[in-house]
Amino acid sequence: MEEADLLISPRWVIPVEPHGAVLEDHAVAVADGRITAVLPAAEAARRFPSAERVDRPAHVLLPGLVNAHTHAAMTLFRGLADDLPLQQWLGEHIWPAEQRWASSEFVRDGAELACVEMLRGGTTCLNDMYFFPDQTAQVAADTGIRAVVGMIVIEQPTPWAATVDEYFDKGLAVHDQFRGHPRIQTAFAPHAPYTVGDDSLRRLRKLADELDVQVHMHVHETANEISTAVAAHGRRPLARLAELGLLSPALAAVHMTQLTPDEITTLADTGASVVHCPESNLKLASGLCPVADLQAAGVNVALGTDGAASNNDLDMFGEMRTAALLAKSVAGDPAAVSAADALAMATINGARALGVAADTGSLVPGKSADMICLDLAHPATQPVYHPVSQVVYAATRDQVTDVWVGGQALIMQGELQLAHAADLEARAEGWRERVARTDV
Amino acid sequence: MEEADLLISPRWVIPVEPHGAVLEDHAVAVADGRITAVLPAAEAARRFPSAERVDRPAHVLLPGLVNAHTHAAMTLFRGLADDLPLQQWLGEHIWPAEQRWASSEFVRDGAELACVEMLRGGTTCLNDMYFFPDQTAQVAADTGIRAVVGMIVIEQPTPWAATVDEYFDKGLAVHDQFRGHPRIQTAFAPHAPYTVGDDSLRRLRKLADELDVQVHMHVHETANEISTAVAAHGRRPLARLAELGLLSPALAAVHMTQLTPDEITTLADTGASVVHCPESNLKLASGLCPVADLQAAGVNVALGTDGAASNNDLDMFGEMRTAALLAKSVAGDPAAVSAADALAMATINGARALGVAADTGSLVPGKSADMICLDLAHPATQPVYHPVSQVVYAATRDQVTDVWVGGQALIMQGELQLAHAADLEARAEGWRERVARTDV
């Protein structure tokens, strides 16, 4: 006999698995933080009479969104510099600001702003790559969000680490610190093929296998990355990663705007995931990821916002819409990447890319109750012919009313349940004043 | 001595003219519905002590947005059919639904839903093209929004008119009915080059000149439109419109995804405006408007959402962001179409394309007080280095708190001030039930 301590009854449930399904007048039953049943609302009321009830009569309930690539703490650089050529943006603004300001305190405050922004916008799981991952992990643990935190490796000294050994040592210390945490996991996060050498990549691949963690890496972000690599080493970065044994289901390759048909086949054969970041790719004019081709080949495509310095928000609803719209244009086919496909990219595919699909990404009995409610009683989402279409093509992040992670209510009827976020805006403003003073 | 009966004091004013300006701690003074001054807040308080005060300490005040191309009543078909090839979408869903359901009542309810959606999302002026424009004009007049309503001409019988003469007669009757209205104007709205013949175009050009109204037309939406025209008539549609004398500052040419360098020069030379609809173009895989090239040539580029059946919302904040992001990718240049450029496209450029720039589109003394407040105290728009960047790249429509048109408060602190919109959702739901029953 199943138990339930919480019963959510929305107008519609979109479980994501099965693909495209919409259940009307159904409820989701939760016990001890896990989904125990998805069933007709009337039956749920009979079977679980003593469960706490949450009724949301104009709402759609869906899995929490998975932001499969971000640099959470960079919220504090949101809008610092826009509309600039890439090298000027990085070289004159972002990198100097990071060298000057990245610190435990900065990452703690920036990650907290990011987690609050993501939770309010319906994202319940993030895949992070940034310095001071110990802080990001701690903030995620404290705010109640689910996170895969990157053990970053980059062969340049930064405020986080001076040498390759120090990156590894500090990353592994974070892994040890959060080992066994129900919501916090780690992944190796080598920055990119052009900033991490073969020895480091071999070393981290071996460690990733041993620790059973994912590898999260920027790959083929721009045409320049490819041409530089070909000129220097005679081969494309993906070929090098293949030789180093990195192409496997453990790899989440971010951006991938430059792909040959053979490379798409290789990705499909090896089971590596692609994390598509459409708004960042557009804003930085990086190139266009061939999402429909990847999908047709059977590659798992997840979605990420990238950092707030290049997006400029961590809004997975906006990212889903942009992904669905852009893929049609890139493919020259209005039938490419449907609304249901985009929603899967933002949920279950993200969970797969992060290696957390057993716990999150769809509303299926046994998984953690990572769920969000969206109020469709807004003039922009009326009338409702097809709820999935409204969620992807017409709703905004601000229609999210309720958010649960592991059955814990983190947002209820639009109100954040975190007490300690009260001075967050003042802390963000304090950082802005300091950063702006040193930005030239 | 200036007067003021209303004084709005936000944290930041973005007047749009001058381009890119941000005024901190300024106020906008309004008298009899018109802007009388934009001045430092302290000075405003001294000069206008008896004016009604609206203080918005975490907000940015900017001109109301101008949606330069929409089919308002199609909100009732929002999400009816998505992710389909263009001809199947039109031929099997949209056109049959229009033939079956378009009526005075349908357009009245659909236009009201559209006006409420647009006002809540900060759009204070629309350029409409649809059947039963008498209804759309009346709804706009009643809701308080500013509108340019299209006298539609299409050489096909529809529920609105059976013959070309009837289209002209009924359109001109709408023009006469609203002549002299402070917020409602008309334009000729020939549907497209492929649905309106030379005789009709000559006739409406002459009438447009006499009545001093704009011409609002879909032009060069898809590659197929061009190739079909070239095969049939031996020339591209824009060349035909030029021969018919339609290229002038009175023309708002919508979509324009297919443009040669010579055509861009012609547009610049003749002063015609382009109305860019990026989300519709992406969703229908229509092609890509070369916005940065048009801008460099000096062409006035405005922004439109298109109808809700192909977008699927009337959200000019989303459209601005998509326009700025997409233009960089199309141009291959992250410095193309800055945030300030995108905001100008969504305001003053739209007003120019519609022929209403003397009244709206920027916060300049003498213009109508068409203004919106946006609350930036949201985790996704903190911290604020550059308010224009936050407005374009990070804010959503749902951060709009206050909307004035002609100085009249239509939304105050998020609350719609219209009493008669109460049963709007029920009416939309009634139409959905009827339309869904006949959609196959």
Image (cartoon, coloured by chain):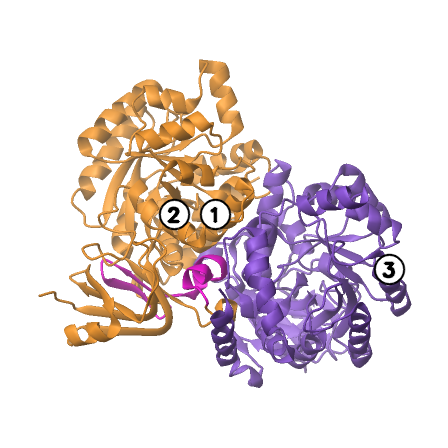
Chain colours: A purple, B orange
- Mark 2 vs mark 3: tell me if same chain: no
- Residue B197 placed where, x, y %? 36, 20
- Taking the spot 69% from the left edge, 67% from the top edge, the residue there is A128
What's under tag 2, amino acid-wise? Answer: Met
Q: Kindly state the secondary structure of the residue where label 3 is placed.
A: helix
Q: Which residues are magenta?
A: B385-414
Name the foreground residue: B423 vs B297: B297
Q: CA distance from mark 2 to mark 3?
A: 51 Å
- Residue furthest toward the bottom? A419
The disc at residue A64 is none
Q: Is residue A126 left or right of residue B110?
A: right
Query: On what subunit does the disc labeled 3 rest?
Result: A
Query: Which residue is label 2 attached to?
Result: B345
Q: Is residue A140 visible?
A: yes
Asked if the magenta segment contains residue A341, the reply would be no
* Contact flag, marks 3 and 1 (Cβ < 8 Å): no
Name the foreground residue: B402 vs B197: B402
Query: Which residue is label 1 attached to?
Result: B323
* Contact flag, marks 1 and 2 (Cβ < 8 Å): yes
Q: CA distance from mark 1 to mark 2?
A: 9 Å
Query: Which residue is label 3 attached to?
Result: A199
